[in-house]
Image: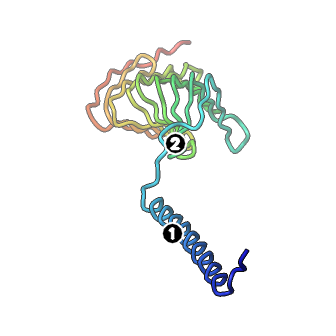
Amino acid sequence: MKAIRPATGVRLIVLIVISAALALGSFWLVEVMQKKTEESMPDRVRTEPDFYVEKFNFVRMAKTGEARYNLTGTGMKHYPQDDSYQIQNPVMHSYSAERPPMVSRSLRATISNNSSEIHMYDNVHIDRPASATSQHFQLKTSYLLVLPDDDVMKTPKPVELILGKSTLNGSGMFANNATGEFRLSSNVKGQYQPPVVTN
């Protein structure tokens, strides 16, 4: 068996080093190109909900520790891209020390902006029973934005309001229950029936 000459051995080592360098260089180039491709591609937007709940009951507390409102529904889905909640058949009970609880319901709703906005859609109906200081109140519309932290309700859509036996119709409603401010923007018409006074 012949011994490998020193010159051949050196050439063999150099060839192995060059081959290894080329292999590492190719691997590095593939990684760089893949990273550049991923960076140039638009981010994939997730459109599917990340969780859902059936037959839920959510309670929002006031700073005083009392229940401000509770919201129930047959189903709720959370969408992470805008941190919103889609609710089926929502029913909201709003509580106040000054007046009876008000019940708001619709076919669907969206909660957004850190639960400070509740958008109610389709067959929106609000009902507040009569009390010693107020008449029976009802509101009907196709869309209503409720701001529970501000005690505000508003809609650009037509509304029908019933207070006792009086009715009021119009479009573009704004109502602030905290300040008593109320207005309708257009197409206003109504029928007033004075409340019956009993002795």
**Image location (x, y in percent) of residue 192:** 36, 21
Q: Residue at x 69, y 80 (%)?
A: 4
Q: Is residue 155 above or below residue 197?
A: below
**Image location (x, y in percent) of residue 85:** 54, 36
Please indicate, yes or no, whether residue 88 appears anywhere in the rendered image.
Answer: yes
* Camera-side residue of 59 and 47: 47
Circle number at residue 29: 1
Q: Nearer the viewer, mark 1 or mark 2?
A: 1
Q: Is residue 165 left or right of residue 92?
A: left
Three-letter amino acid code of the residue under disc 1:
Leu
Assess disc 1: are there few (<14), some (14-19) or many (≥20) residues with their C-alpha within 10 Å of its C-alpha. Answer: few
Farthest front residue?
A: 1
Q: Earlier in the sequence, mark 1 or mark 2?
A: 1
SS at mark 2 in the image: strand
Q: Residue at x 62, y 75 (%)?
A: 16
Q: Residue at x 48, y 31 (%)?
A: 109
Assess disc 2: are there few (<14), some (14-19) or many (≥20) residues with their C-alpha within 10 Å of its C-alpha. Answer: some
Farthest left residue?
A: 187
Please indicate, yes or no, whether residue 177 appears anywhere in the rendered image.
Answer: no
* Camera-side residue of 157 and 12: 12
Which residue is disc 2 drawn over? 112
The C terminus is located in which quarter?
Answer: top right
